[in-house]
Amino acid sequence: MKKRIILVAVLAIIALGLVITILSKNAGSKTISGAGATFPQPFYNAAFITYGHLAHVKVTYGGIGSGGGIRSLKDKVVDFGASDAFLSDKEMNEMPAPVVHIPTCCGAVVIAFNLPGIKQIKLTPDVLAAIFSGKIKNWNSTELKKINSGIHFPNKAIVVIHRSDGSGTTNMFTDYLSKVDAAWRAKIGSGKTVNWPVGIGAKGNPGVAGAIHQTVGSIGYVGSEYAFAQHQPSALVQNKSGNFIEASVASVSAAAQCAIPADTRVMLNNSSAKDAYPIAGFTWLLLYKNQAYNNRSFAQAQATLKLVDWMLDHDAQKIASKVNYAPLAPNVAAKAKAILRTITYNGKRVLK
Amino acid sequence: MSAYIYNMQINSDKVLKRVLFASSIVILLIGGGMLVSLIKGSMPSISEFGWKFLVSSKWDPTQGSESYGALAFIVGTLMTSVLALIIAIPLAFFTSLFIAEYFKGTKIAAVVGTLVDLLAGIPSIIYGLWGFYILCPLVVKLGLSPQGFGVFTSSLILAIMIVPYATSLSNTTIAMVPNELKEAAYSLGATRLEVIKTVVLPNARSGIAASYVLALGRALGETLAVTMLIGNANIIPTSIFGTGNTMASVIANQFGEASGLQLSALIEIGLLLFALTTIVNAIGKYIIKKIG
Amino acid sequence: MNRTIDIEKEDSSLSHIKYQKAKDGLFKIAVILFSFITISMVFLIIGTLLVKGYRQINWAFFTQVAPDTFTAMMAKVSGQVIPGGIANGILGSLYLVGIASVLSIPIGILIGVYLSENSQKKYASLIRDIADILQGVPSIVIGLIAYIWIVVPITKSYSVLAGGVALAIMMLPLIVRSTEESLKMVPDTLKEAAIALGTPYYKVIWRVLIPSAFSGLVSGILLSVSRVLGETAPLMLATLGNPNINWNITKPGSAVPLLIWQFYNDPNMVDLIWSSTIFLMGFVLLLNLISKWIEAKRKK
């Protein structure tokens, strides 16, 4: 008797589930899905929720990593991908069809440290590279004292903390170090994962930030959106013009005040702009240039592009700065919008 | 008439036997399918590195000079899983006896059993965080390691995570040992311990062993908790308190961002873990057979 | 002469008994001690969770969807409880685990029955070994498999179905082995008696064997469900996540562990991870209590 009741209950639940599934499939509410970089996820989630209410679409974004995003786009299981690193020419060739890059905001790599009583330190590019490659091993070394007159460093070993997982933040940081330090470029190079000569690996921004917080004498690199929200003490880094710049939303946006190529595929590191924070970069959305693939409807393509277009507008960019992401400079936003309007569906332009 | 029913019964028996056999094929399909998919994904890495992959501990993703080797991770995986099992078995064994033998059927056994089962529902990221906030400082205070990360800390967390697996099936089988057998031994004047040694354990041996194998499997494949506590150094650990990395952890860490040869190397590590689990399970089952 | 021998024998058997009693007492102490250590670990962990998370638990927590980072930031700055909740995750998790259960429980039990009924055969050993090996596959690899088998070719999108399949694969080994080992413990006499009475095979299994092994089956299922409720990695590769409540099986879905991962990586929403975990714990506890209630009812 009891078993029969349970059996009937289970079947009823399954039947209910099927009914709901079939009903919701025909509900008509559009779903747009994207996957990729974890760096912009808080911004994207906030923006997509707002857009969802505006346009009555459901937008899903999964921060599974830039590599995952590119893979998902390649396999055509998402409407757009997201990446902190632009595709190289070789990677562009590996995609089944041409892909465009749309930058959405800027982020930076902040150098956080844990020295009791010391709130700010200055770092030059060579000293920064030397610390992270293990050449400078102690806080009271002569190089550090030279550029930080007035700060009394303790006699403590420097504990370097880097990312254990592959990440666009690592890519941005190592790309910068490769640009400013020949020895780094030769021995370690740049990439989402590199062979760190010294230090401990921690997972994700929270891992690195947490490890720095718990280890006295540590230094590490954290994504700006995380660092700004946590108000961690960070280093002033000397930029190409010789100024020591503190990382902030303004100084990061300033990094884009320079020549940007038409397809926006550029790393903003070591920018020549005067007030620019030197370790900064774009994050992009990736879309197929021809949206007519895989039985994709024109309506779906249009909905996706409208979403991306909205991301470049003032309201979305305001959300970005509210949650500690650096908005796009006007020249970049204009270029991005122009690229969007080159996307076609079977030869016809999708957006006016 | 009865011959008709008899034939019908034989037919329904046959059908059932065929259905049961068919269901077992599902396991074959899943296991085989997984193997095929993993091999396919590993091919670029296998053809590039061959046997070197197994004995090299170099993991260099630098563009232009990529070189991958799984040795450091194989050692890390073995160290953490075996150590975790060694820590977990005494805990699980005695707790199982508590629940299923000494206090069998009582409310306190039910409470203890439920509490242990709760451990299985905690997401691994929370275990990792708990280990980070509570265990790491403890290990640092005891002077065992400078930052608290390392093989030992990870093994400790793994041990806690696999206890419910080691107890669950053990509880079931120990509790199901027929009372008559135990009564018979008691009537001969045996103490509780003697009854356990001579009646309960031999009877429940298969289930207990199975639960430890399952617990070991869980330890071998655990990703997030280990990755947050082991220090992620792609080297062979120099001691139990040193840092290192495991196969599951490195896959989880780098998978999201990997492509090309690195992705293939990671998939090959997944394949190797498959092989490692097979070997370790076989060794475990052999040891169990010898002890019994 | 005889008396001395008798006394020696009595003495030695007495001391033998004393020795056994001592060992017995020590063993009992060990049992209680180790169990106590295990339980303290449980209290330590759950205690930490409760202390860190109780503030975020309110009615809205269960009925509203996850907040965005800005709302959370504002709440954090003003020292308030973060608004919103994990409703999309809760319903998503239930949906996923429901699908996984429907896929894995019936088949797992069937396979377990097969293995216990044919345990001598070599083929059965092979199946058993493969099941044990599957238990060791890292969850992220299973996610990858679900991505290759379901996301790309079948649903052509991240989907609840792919997540359900991934979780089902993770549940299978435990259910199979629990069923098998529990059935093995049922005395052969029961089965033989039923067969002797001319009971057809399916009735022997359904009405005799499985009811006797029922508690073992339930434990195995309970443990499997508890585990997959908290799994993150496979869902990241198969289901992606969803800020809304979604019932469409071919589209991305949410789950509580995915939300936990999202909260963890967001500097403003970190506090929500503890309350989300408390929810998972509460749910596992509920399942536990339900299964114990079913057990009690059956015994009557």
Image (cartoon, coloured by chain):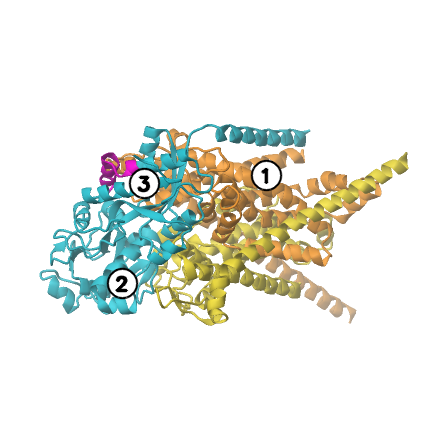
Residue at the extreme front: A347
> In the rendered image of this protein, which colour is used for chain C?
orange
Closest to the camera, between mark 2 and mark 1, is: 1
| Residue B21 lies within the magenta run | no
User: Is disc 3 in contact with disc 1, using a CB cutoff of under 8 Å?
Assistant: no
Residue kind at label 2, given as amino acid type: Val
Residue B65 falls left or right of residue C228: left
Residue under label 1: C102
Residue C159 falls left or right of residue C104: left
- Front residue of B210/B60: it is B60
Overall secondary structure of the magenta section: helix
In the picture, which chain is yellow?
B
Residue A44 falls left or right of residue B260: left
Q: What stretch is highlighted in magenta?
A: A308-324
Q: Which chain carries label 1?
A: C
Q: How many marks?
A: 3
Percent from the top left, x then y, of residue C94? 50, 36
> In the rendered image of this protein, which colour is used for chain A?
cyan
If you read the primary sequence from the N terminus, does the residue marked by circle 2 or circle 3 appear first?
A: 3
**Residue at horizontal 42 percent and vertical 59 percent from the top:** B260
**Mark 3 neighbour density, 10 Å: few (under 14) some (14–19) many (20 or more):** many
